[in-house]
Amino acid sequence: MSRWQYRVTVHSAEEILGRLPESVAEIPPMLYCDTEGICYFDAGDPFLRAIEAVLNGIGDRGWELVQVAFRAQQMICFWKQPR
């Protein structure tokens, strides 16, 4: 039976924006929700690359991403790795 250890990280909008690969015009990321309560994040390509940089930094240390949740001005990540 596999045993796991878990980690939760919280990343501010400022931290993510600090990882932008190049300067871009101020385009605020948007969170869209449909009438059934399903929400999705749309941030445009440079913003997605900044999020990838945050995720890859932790993934490079052996953590596997389990889930991401977006809140206003924050990204919450749930990670696991074998013990």
Image (cartoon, grey):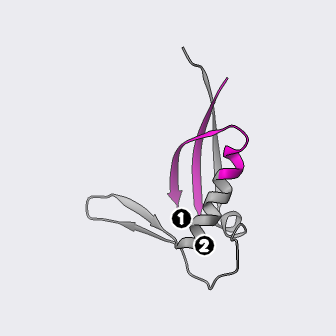
Q: Which residue is found at the position 70% from the left and 63% from the top?
A: 15
Instruction: Name the residue beneath numbered marker 1.
Output: 72
Q: Which residues are magenta?
A: 56-83
Residue 1: quadrant of the picture: top right
Question: Given the image, on which type of amino acid does mark 2 rest?
Answer: Pro
Q: Amino acid type of disc 1?
A: Ala
**What is the residue that sits farthest to the bottom in this orientation?**
25
Q: Which secondary structure lies at badge 2?
A: helix
* Residue highlighted by disc 2: 46
Q: Residues within 10 Å of mark 1 (few under 14, many from 20)?
A: few
Say if 64 sits above or below 26 in the image.
Answer: above
Q: CA distance from mark 2 to mark 1?
A: 19 Å
- Quarter of the image containing the C terminus? top right
In the rendered view, tell whether residue 23 sits above or below residue 55.
below
Q: In the image, residue 68 lies at what x, y percent?
A: 52, 50
Q: Nearer the viewer, residue 46 or 66?
A: 46
